Each structure stands twice: as C-alpha cells, then as structure tokens.
Amino acid sequence: MDENMFISYNYIGEIAGLIMAGLILMLFLYTKPKKTYVFKYIFGGIIISIAAILIQISIVHVANNPDLYFNRYLFMGQLLIFLILYNGILYCIFSYVNMMSIVRRAQRKEFIMMYALLSVVYIAGVIIEIAARHFYSFEVDGIDISHFVKYYSGAGIVCAVICFNATLSNRLNVARVIWHAVIVCVPIEICFLLFQMLSIDRFHSIFMAMSYVPVFALGYVLFHSNPYDDLTGSQNEYGLMSYVDKYIGKRKFYVSYIDLKYPNVESFGNNVDDIFMKAVSICRAVEAIKPRVTLFRVAENRFIAVIRVDDYQKFLSVINNIRGVLDGARADMSVPINYVMISGEAYPELETSTKCRQYFQYISRRFKNQNSSHFYVTKPSDFDEFIEEYDIAVTLEDIRNRLDLDDERVVVYAQPIYSVETGNFKAAEALTRLRLGEKLISPDRFIPIAEESGTIHAITCIVLNKVCKAIVEFDEFYDFDAISINVSSREISHKNAYYDLMEIIERYDFNVSRIRFEITESAMFENYEMANENMNSLTKAGIHFYLDDFGTGYSSFERVMNCPVKTIKFDKTLLYKSIDDERMDDIMTYMIEVFKKNGFITLVEGVEDEAQSQYSMERGFDYIQGYLYAKPEPLEEMKKYFDRKNKF
C-alpha cells in the first residue's frame, strides 16, 4: 500500500458519544431529574455536545470526501462553529465542577472573568492558526485535520488541569464524592486527550466526544438521575420534587398522600417478601386507575399520588378508586395491612414540593398511632391551620437562629399567684405568647412545635432574659418573692442547661432566689440523672423549683421527695376531681398533709370560682393561682398586683 495514500478518518467514537448524549437527553426529558443549582450546566452541556458532535461528524465527512463536499468557506465555517461549541462544552464542565462548592458560587463572577480570559487566549490561538492555515492541509484523496484535532485536544487538557487545581485548592469545601470523582476522572481525562493527540496521525481515529460526554453522564448519574423504583415502578422523591416545583401555582392538580402500615416483620408469620409483593400489587393497581395518576415513593411504605385533573368531581372519582385498591388489599388477610390516605388540592400557596409534602404529613399526624385505616379529604380549614403552624415553625426557627434575647416576637405575660398566709400576691408565673404578625399565639399552640423542632431552648432563654429585666425593675419598689418560668424536659435534661441559664441570670444584679423554675413530672423522669444533676446545681445557686402539673403523671411520693423541688403545684384536674369525688378528696387531703410535713410548699392552679377557692383554703394550700384571683396580663402589669415597699 502506498505510504502517501490518504487513510479515511474513523469517527465511531463520535457516533458512540452522540448515542450516549442522546440517551442522556432522553433521560433528562423523561425522568424529571433533580434540578439543582448546577443542573443548567449539565443540561446545556449535553445540548451543546450533541450539536458539536454533529458538526464534528460533518467535518470528518468533508475531510474524507473533499471532492464531493469541500467548499473552502463552508469548511472553515464548520471548523469555527465546532471550536466555539467546544469552548462552550469546556465552559459547562468548568462551571459544573467549580460551582459544586458553595464557596466557589460566592466567587462566581471571578470564575466567569477567569474563563473569559481563557476564552480570549483560546480564540486568539484560533485566529493565529487560521491566519497561518495550519488547521488543515490537502493530501491525495483527503484533507488532513490532525492539527485541528490536536489544537482543541490541547485546550481540553488545559481546562482539565485548571479544574483539577481549582478543586484541589478547595477540597475542604466540596463533598467527598465530588473530590473523589475529580481525582479519579481528571487524570483519566488528561490521558485520554493525550492519546487522541498522539494517535490522530497514526490511526486517523477521532473519538473526542468520548472525552466530554461521559463527564456529563457521570454528573447526571451521581447528582441528577431520577431512576424509577425497581420494586414498585414508581418514581422517587426527587421526581416528586421536580414535578411539584415545576407545576405548583401554574397548573391545578391534586395530591393523595398514602401511608401503608404493615405489621412488624419479626412478629409476622409470613416472609418479608409477602409484604413487598403486597406493596407492588397496590402500586400496579393504582397505576392502572388512570393515566393521569403518577405514583411517587417517598419512603419505604409511604407514597404520594399526583392526580393531574382540574375537576373536583374527577378528583373524587380517582381517589375513591385508589381507596378501593387499598380496601381490597386490606381484605386479603394473608398480609394484614392498614393505611392512612389524605387527599386534597395542591394549593398554589404551598409554593414548593417540601411545603406541599409537609402539609399532607401535618394532617396525617392526626391519625398517628391509631390501629385502623383512615381516608380523609382535606378542607380549606386544614390548609389555614397548616399555614399557621408552618409560619409558627418558620418564626421559631428564625428566633433560634438570631437568638436576640430581646426579640419582640417572644411576648411575656404573667399570672399572679395568691398567698393564703399573707392575703396578697407574692409571686407570678411567666407565660409566653408568640407574636405572629398581628396575632398572639398561645403557648398551647406553639410550645409543642418548639419542642419538636428543637427551638424551645431559645424561647426559654429569651423569656428568662425578659423576666430578669422585669425583676430588676420591680425589685426596687415592689414587695414580691419571685417570678417562675417554665423549663421543658429536654432543656433540664441537657448537659449545658445549668450554664446556659445561669449565664443569663448572672448578667443582672438581683437576688437569684427571685427566679424560680417550673418543671413537669415528665421532665424529672425523662433523663432522671442529668435532670437531677442540673436541678441540684441550680438549687445550690439559689433557684427554687416547682413541680408543675402534679397529679397528671405517674410519680411516686418517694421519687418526688428525693427530687430537689420545693413547691408542689397541683394540677387543676386533680382539684376538680377532688371536689366531686369523696375518695379523691381523701387522697388529696392526705397528699397535702404528707408534703407539708416533709417541708414542701403546696400550690394549686386553675381556681376559677368561689367553691374551688374555699375548698383549696380548707385543705391547706399555701398558694392559689387561677382566673378567680387574676388573669394573665403583660409582664409589666404585675406591678399593680404586688404591694409597694414602704420606704422611710
């Protein structure tokens, strides 16, 4: 064979890259991938890659068959278009890798400027090569484009090295999986590009597409893929996020939240596979109901069905069909099953997939720990209640994050406590309200949310700070013993409770005994050792403890007497039962006597009429608290209940 004979370029690698890019694009369009901050770079990179590969294939066709296709200006245009597209591909890879770091995102403008500078150098090189006519040369029966391939391969190597160095210098601020992907893939990429540069003259094979399309494929698989669940055939949580975030507020649709409740596998006679098969059969039956129903699996036994209809009656028809599937599954007693199914409109005000799911989970909590099935269609009032709870949770989280001890959203009220011995008010209990816009939210509404969300300690610290300020103000002119503050079980059981609370108290100049803490029976016994240690430390500092809501828990006399509390606060339910029940009256009388003999102070709350007041006094309570004597008022109003000091 003649050594000068032109060998046609092989572009099978480009075709493979085109097929791969096409498949990824189909996955993007079909599976609703997770659209993160960097998704635009990987999606744009795939689009540009497809265009670049098609141009590259057309260039190779011309190079292999110049007699049929060559036109100087068109061919030069093809080369320039490819080089511009390839620069776009490098930009997408460069941005995708670097913008994985939150630190780099903050430096985004600087990175754009840096890449713009690199692009200027790249384009300047292109202009020089065009002027020197180095990009291609004619041979017998073909066009040599090896220099053209080497040029942009070199640009790819430069980009890979810069990406590697940028990630190396920022490795502490990127996820480990990203760092591992970079240190493994970039060296392979550089070797691949070097092989392309060195082999183009000898083998006449072009496979550059396989140097950049797999990068986008890897990014898709690691961070954006949204595969269907292989067991149930439903999409996963990210598919739900993608769909809801895309259409909520723009298109009317409904949601059905389904929580399947299976028996404990260990106590269930059949194989665990039977349970899985039950779940699969339910999913298949739901899928068959209507093509406009899409099922998403968001947890092991929890599903969300998105129902794409805009008519309420059609929606009711669909959810009744789903209910029929679930009831049919219940009827099969081979695998006992219960379910909770909450269905309703995905209101535009829900805004995001996270908030939408929280709404339906909020309603499902009403049926928690109930050993039966429930079917419920939401009402507008449910949405109003959820929005209030959501706003409360957001506000509480913001209060915790700011931790402004003077935060005006935490409003302190107080209820005076009447001393039977002196016949006047000697103490008060601080009661918290949460300001939410123009409304004041009662503690019964927001305290459970604060405890569940872990924001309760911030609320206690703010209340304590405001009470300390009030005590300093009252102490000079008014005669009172103390103001008490409720402390949650989680707080008093935390190892830092003593230090956090004392740090605030010690900022102010007053007798520490003016502060008292109220804890419940559950607080004492949730983590007895840690709670007892904190209470002993605070007691030594001079703080007096109340045992709140006594009579609602399961404490014994022995354990209560061994705890460092000084005042026993009887719950109102115990008071009401004792008035109506002679046996309870005997028990109440006995408990008061035992506590007083052992040095405890007794207080009863919830006294609302004269009969209850008379009973409380006759049984020997030391202090009485209730609406009959005084209602809760803003903390500063306690001055009108406390006697003024006599000054001579």
Image: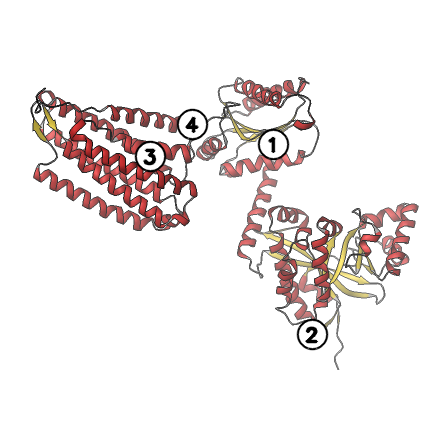
Q: Residues within 10 Å of mark 2 (few under 14, many from 20)?
A: few
SS at circle 1: loop
Q: Dividing the picture into quarters, in which one does residue 84 lie?
A: top left
Which of the numbered marks, if any, corresponds to residue 31? 4
Q: Residues within 10 Å of mark 4 (few under 14, many from 20)?
A: some
Residue assigned mark 2: 476
Tell me the CA gap for discs 3 and 4. Answer: 19 Å
Looking at numbered disc 4 in the image, what kind of residue is underneath it? Thr
SS at circle 2: loop
Q: Earlier in the sequence, mark 4 or mark 2?
A: 4
Estimate the x, y position of residue 601 in percent, counting from the top left.
82, 61
Estimate the x, y position of residue 137 in percent, counting from the top left.
9, 31
Q: Earlier in the sequence, mark 3 or mark 2?
A: 3
SS at circle 4: helix
Q: Earlier in the sequence, mark 2 or mark 1?
A: 1
Tell me the CA gap for discs 4 and 1. Answer: 29 Å
As rendered, which of 416 and 305 lies closer to the eye?
A: 305
Tell me the CA gap for discs 3 and 2. Answer: 73 Å
Q: Earlier in the sequence, mark 3 or mark 4?
A: 4
Q: Is residue 222 left or right of residue 554?
A: left
Which of the numbered marks, if any, corresponds to residue 378? 1
Residue assigned mark 3: 215
As rendered, which of 95 and 150 lies closer to the eye?
A: 150
Tell me the CA gap for discs 4 and 2. Answer: 70 Å
If the image is split into quadrants, where does the N terminus sit? top left
Looking at numbered disc 1 in the image, what kind of residue is underneath it? Thr
Q: Residues within 10 Å of mark 1 (few under 14, many from 20)?
A: few
